[in-house]
Amino acid sequence: MEVTHLKLMKRAGLALALAACLAAPTSAQRLDGIAAVVNDDPVLESDVEEQLYLLLQRAQSRPDSDAVDTLRRQVLDQIINDKLIVAEAKRQAIAVSDVEVERALEQQIAQKKEELGGEEAFREQLRRENTTEDKLREKYRADLKLQLMGQRLLAKQFPSKTVPAAEAEAFFKANPSRFPKAPAEVHVSVIQIPITADSAADARAFSV
């Protein structure tokens, strides 16, 4: 009986230990935190830290803790703005086709290669940043889609309007005080007469 009781106690202790491990996860198993919520869409802290890491890696600098905190807040603000653009674009049924994104992507990659000095310098920069062209294209693709969405959203909110010349002239005449007066201009013309041998002789004769 005592042996059986001892075995039961050991099993109960093991079960409690396992339950404690499952109930209190380690820091490596810690749930991802939420940095912000945009229209019920959470911004995870891990997303912010990942973007911050890439930013610092590209900058190749070691800023102090205050500067890192400032950059972290800027990264979070950018992610929030991106989510707001996407949400508003969806609400207004603004879409960007894959063809448009790929066209802009090829232009962006070509521009980056030209800025770095060619294909080999471009590859070296990828190795320095510990990334690949596929990963870079994936990031550029997402950024360009957001950029194109933002441009179309702004164009829809603030459409450009061409003012006819007659309307502009009528407005100018009706509001002359709102426009600065042009300063007076003086036009000077110089007439040059070439001197020839005959004219020089005539001038000497005239002086006599």
Image (spheres, rainbow, N blue to C red):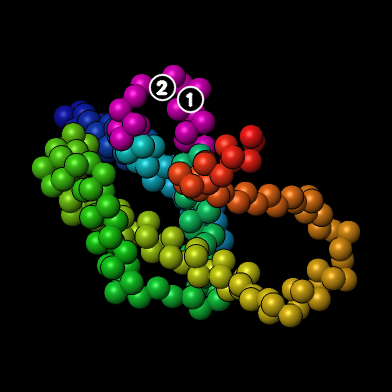
The kind of residue tagged 2 is Pro
The image shows residue 52 at horizontal and vertical percentages of 39, 37
* Position of residue 59 in the picture relative to residue 45 (left or right): left
The image shows residue 46 at horizontal and vertical percentages of 38, 42
| Quarter of the figure that contains the C terminus | top right
For disc 2, the neighbor class at 10 Å (few under 14, some 14 to 19, many from 20) is few
Residue at 56 percent of width and 70 percent of height: 155
Whole-number angstrom distance, CA of label 2 to CA of label 1: 6 Å
Whether the magenta-drawn stretch holds residue 67 is answered as yes
Describe the element under mark 2 as helix, strand or loop. Answer: loop
Residue occupied by mark 1: 67
- Visible in this render: residue 68? yes
The image shows residue 43 at horizontal and vertical percentages of 47, 50
In the image, 30 versus 34, the foreground residue is: 34
In the image, residue 150 sits, relative to residue 189, either above or below, namely below
* Position of residue 202 in the picture relative to residue 7 (left or right): right
Residue at 43 percent of width and 65 percent of height: 148
The kind of residue tagged 1 is Ala
Whether the magenta-drawn stretch holds residue 52 is answered as no
* Position of residue 139 in the picture relative to residue 164 (left or right): left
Could you say which quadrant of the image residue 12 lies in?
Answer: top left
Residue occupied by mark 2: 63
The image shows residue 206 at horizontal and vertical percentages of 63, 41
Residues at marks 2 and 1 touching, judged by CB atoms closer than 8 Å: yes
Magenta stretch bounds: 56-73
Q: Which residue is at the far left?
A: 120
In the image, 138 versus 187, the foreground residue is: 187
